[in-house]
Amino acid sequence: MPYRSPVGDILFSLNAVADLKGMVGKGLAGDLDWDSVVSIVGEAGRFATEEIAPLNRPGDLNGARYENGVVTTAPGFGDVYRRWAEAGWNGVSAPTEFGGMGLPHAVNVACTEIWNGASMAFALCPLLTEGAVHALQGFGSRELLDRYLAQMVSGRWTGTMNLTEPQAGSDLNAIRTRAERADDGSYRLFGQKIFITYGEHDMAENIVHLVLARLPGAPAGTRGLTLFLAPKFLVNDDGSLGPRNDLRCAGIEHKLGIHASPTCVMVYGDNEGAKAWRVGEENRGLAAMFVMMNAARLAVGTQGVAIGERAYQQALAYARERRQGRGPNGGDGMVPIIAHADVQRMLMTMKANVQAARGVCHLTGVSLDLASHAGTAEERSAAANRAALLTPIAKAFSTDIGDEAASLGVQVHGGMGFIEETGAAQHMRDSRIAAIYEGANGIHGIDLVQRKLPLADGATVRKEIAGVREIASDVAGRGGAGFGATAERLADAADALEESTRLMLDWLGSDQNSALAGASPYLRLFGLAFGGACLAKAGLAAEALAESGDKSELGRVGLARFYAEKLAVAAPGLARAIASGGAPLEPYEAILADSA
Ligand SMILES: Cc1cc2nc3c(=O)[nH]c(=O)nc-3n(C[C@H](O)[C@H](O)[C@H](O)COP(=O)(O)OP(=O)(O)OC[C@H]3O[C@@H](n4cnc5c(N)ncnc54)[C@H](O)[C@@H]3O)c2cc1C
């Protein structure tokens, strides 16, 4: 069965889990109504299924190619990208002032999943452009906005994010790219960046690079970084393209996955220096870049959901066709492998995890919308804190889930999963990067614990834990028998999360090592409890629908139960692992010592 964008599941989650329908119903998204959301998501799904998804496999096989500074993208990528941009899809959440649709973040999250499920390597290009648009919108001068933004929103020009250097990955303090002031108020850049996604390609007329660099005499570390805009082609006053800038792509990487997405080494300033303009204040570049990174983090989390969904669809289709072994009650002939309990376990784990992570991403998107549009300042501030708390979970939990689902997808295929021909292996190779870029997942665990738990003196995280409890008691109060032990297991997960949160907040003041050692398991625990609540909410909505005569969604009750009884039960174990604290220095060296 070919891949289909999961439009129905996405809309169900946007409505029942994230309450986007409620938000637009209250007029918090201008004059947008729910029917329009349904038709936009449906049309995105159609375009992705019909036009983008067929690029995925040939893109993997052909990859992007590099020769003498020129990058040629995989066959079909340029044509489809141009049709996609002409249809307006590059500007889903971009400001209407610059030609965007100005739709809520939550709708953009839905579309981002749709593009990435169809082809992650394709969707990465606009993902970076969108981040660059956000950063420029927040920090660019009026002149920069007028010169660049409409072209970037339309997708005629694409954007990149240039942070990483060979010695500066997770630790941006070490960035060395140098900026010099020029007499005309612009700047010149000198240095090398690595791993720059779509740093060079042939799909758009111009490429707008956002580059972190250091001015002479700037303070050491990240407090001395300034953000610059450097276009591939300089832009004349009338908006036409001028000569090439002094920057080039020196090569592209050979990678495990996303072969069709060029990952570029970029060299700035071979000669007179790459001409650049400042975005935001001097030495405040990281603040501007964070705007871009926060948008990109949620988008990358959504990539985890997208690939997990695609791997699930493929594994489900295979499991329905492949016949092996006898069914549970014996019989003569071989049965489709989906009849085996262990294969059902794998498929349900994939589906439940993907839908839980989708719920986390949708709620993060809606929180971002409410942070701008909720009725009162207090509501806006609470929503902003909620979005900040959920962003590392949306990024790291969802991308871990994407990886696990893709790996299970290979397992469901048996030996054929290991053979490239089926395509299951591509999902596993493609998904692996999402847990690494946009901040490796371990760094997001640390961000969650060190920066997000203390928000509003712990009130933000406590409110989320109370929310999980509330849903558990809703299930206990009005959920049907199909929920099994969901309410109890969710309450256990909330207890585990509460206990670990208390420990983490204590340790932040007294034992940083234990807090850091527990950060990743804590993020997973949070995802499990919160994801379980998302699925339970969807299950309750499905029951309500059934009461009004539509029983088509009732499978969601069983899915919520599976998640609570089989997956969220790991929460107390994680809490125990966290409570055992960090390893003191000496045992770590002894434990990891080379054997004689
Ligand atoms: C395909 C691809 C595309 C990319 N696209 C871009 C792009 O467009 N723009 C861009 O600027 N960059 C890009 N990157 C770079 C990417 O963001 C970095 O690879 C990532 O941030 C990790 O940095 P690193 O590779 O140097 O790993 P390192 O920083 O060396 O980390 C290695 C490991 O150590 C852990 N670690 C590091 N520091 C700590 C710490 N303080 N505490 C605990 N654990 C720690 C990490 O979690 C990780 O597991 C891309 C990379 C790839 C592979």
Image (tube, rainbow, N blue to C red):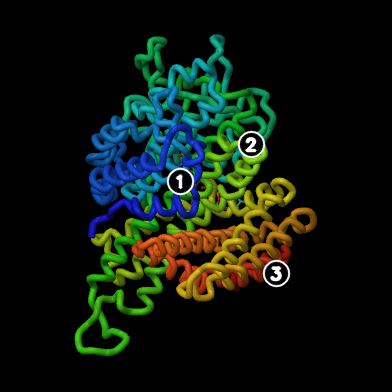
Residue beneath disc 2: 376
* Crowd rating for badge 1 (residues with CA inside 10 Å; few <14, some 14–19, many 20+): some
Q: Amino acid at mark 3?
A: Ser
Above or below 566: residue 513: above
**Residue 133 picture location, percent across and down:** 47, 30
Q: Amino acid at mark 2?
A: Thr
Q: CA distance from mark 2 to mark 3?
A: 42 Å
Expressed as whole percent of the image width and height from the top left, the position of residue 228 reads 53, 25
In-image side of 333 versus 253 (left or right): left
Kindly state the secondary structure of the residue where label 2 is placed: loop
Residue 337 placement, left or right of 437: left
Residue that appears at 61% across and 72% down: 573
Q: Is residue 117 above or below residue 151?
A: below
Query: What is the quadrant of residue 182 in the picture?
Result: top right
Q: Earlier in the sequence, mark 1 or mark 3?
A: 1
Q: Closest to the observer: 180 or 2?
A: 2
Are the residues tagged 1 and 2 within 8 Å (C-beta)?
A: no
